[in-house]
Image: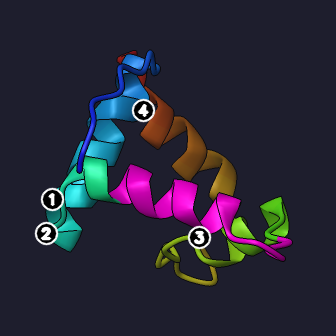
Amino acid sequence: MKGRLNLTIDEQLIVEIKRYAGKKDIPVSELVEDFFKKVLKPGSKSSIIDMVDNLEKAEIPGDADLTELYYQKRGERYGS
């Protein structure tokens, strides 16, 4: 049986997670449910390092100016 859960999450994070779920063609609720199952799994010693290692990797050229890319993305996200 499924139940409902109300969460309060940063609006920008909601936009990003919906975009991610759309790319993966899975509902956001399934992502959340899978995360909770993983966290609650007995003997699971999932750390933040494991979570970061599982993130989708960005494709950045080796000669890219990371500072410039940061400010470009920040400008796209927050305007300015």
Left or right position of 49 against 79: right
Crowd tier of the residue under label 3, counting other residues whose Cα lies within 10 Å: few below 14, some 14–19, many 20 or above? few
Q: In the rendered structure, are the residues bearing label 4 and label 3 in contact, judged by CB atoms less than 8 Å apart?
A: no
- Looking at marks 2 and 3 on the same chain, the residue that comes earlier in the sequence is marked by 2
Crowd tier of the residue under label 4, counting other residues whose Cα lies within 10 Å: few below 14, some 14–19, many 20 or above? few
Q: In the rendered structure, are the residues bearing label 2 and label 1 in contact, judged by CB atoms less than 8 Å apart?
A: yes
Q: Is residue 76 visible?
A: no
Q: How is the image coloured?
A: rainbow
Alpha carbon distance from label 2 to label 4? 18 Å
Q: Nearer the viewer, residue 9 or 57?
A: 9
Q: Nearer the viewer, residue 3 or 28?
A: 3
Choose mark 1 or mark 3, whichever is in front.
1
Left or right position of 70 against 53: left
* Residue in the image at 33% along x and 42% along y: 16
Q: Is residue 72 magenta?
A: no
Q: Is residue 35 magenta?
A: yes
Magenta-highlighted stretch: main secondary structure?
helix
* Residue in the image at 38% along x and 26% along y: 12
Q: In the rendered structure, are the residues bearing label 2 and label 4 in contact, judged by CB atoms less than 8 Å apart?
A: no
Q: Position of residue 60 (x, y in %)?
A: 52, 75
In the rendering, which numbered label is found on residue 64? 3
Left or right position of 71 against 49: left
Q: Amino acid at mark 1?
A: Gly
Q: Amino acid at mark 4?
A: Leu
Query: Which quadrant of the view contains residue 51?
Result: bottom right
The residue that mark 4 highlights is 13
Q: Is residue 60 visible?
A: yes
Query: Which quadrant of the view contains residue 55?
Result: bottom right
In the rendering, which numbered label is found on residue 22? 1
- Looking at marks 1 and 3 on the same chain, the residue that comes earlier in the sequence is marked by 1
Give the structural element (helix, strand or loop) at label 4: helix
Alpha carbon distance from label 2 to label 1? 5 Å
